[in-house]
Image: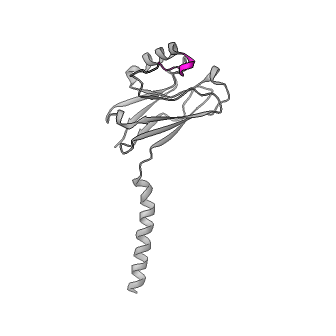
Amino acid sequence: MKTLLRTLCAIVSCTTAFVAAPALAADCSATVESNDAMQFNVKTLSVPAACKTFSVTLKHVGKLPKTAMGHNLVLTVPGDVAAVATDGIAAGVANDYVKPQDARVIAHSKLIGGGESTQVDIPVAKLKAGTDYTYFCSFPGHNSIMKGTLKLGS
């Protein structure tokens, strides 16, 4: 009987460890979809503080080309969105509508069109706890609609 109890306890312990393991690991990635109606499908991203890098895959699920309905993902503080977007327009499509070496930009993806995807890696060390960040599309005219909030979690 003692052997049976020990075996059952061992099985339960191992099963619990396997079930709990994913909860302990930080999920350091997310996917955000964009479409031809100028929308992101995710409005809030929470970045686990345990991550060194947080990777966001941006998928354009629409059909229009990037010249007509291109999307990117740019991360900055909320107060800089309008200025970064304006400077991005001046930087042009060749720069993915992001001013080169813009210190206000924490991270940004390349510009993509319908059916394409890209990834942007956000260095978590550049984020501060308790601070809200805004991710948005800097394609001309999109930033007022296509945006979301990113926060550093615990």
Residue at the image position 44 percent from the left and 44 percent from the top: 28
Residue 123, picture quadrant: top left
At which x and y percent is residue 25? 41, 52
Residues drawn in magenta:
92-99
- Residue 77 at what x, y percent from top left? 38, 25
- 14 is higher (above) or lower (below) than 119: below
- Residue 59 visible in this rendered orientation of the protein: no
Main secondary structure type of the part rendered in magenta: loop
Residue 109 vs 26, above or below: the answer is above
Camera-side residue of 126 and 33: 126
Quarter occupied by residue 6: bottom left
Is residue 118 visible in this depiction of the protein? Answer: yes
Whether residue 76 is in magenta: the answer is no
Q: Quadrant of residue 103?
A: top left
User: Which residue occupies the foreground of this view, 128 or 2?
Assistant: 128
Q: Residue furthest top?
A: 90
Left or right: where 43 falls relative to 132: right
Quarter holding the C terminus is top left
**Residue at image location 33% in from the left, 31% down from the top:** 131
Residue beneath the point at 37% across and 31% down: 132
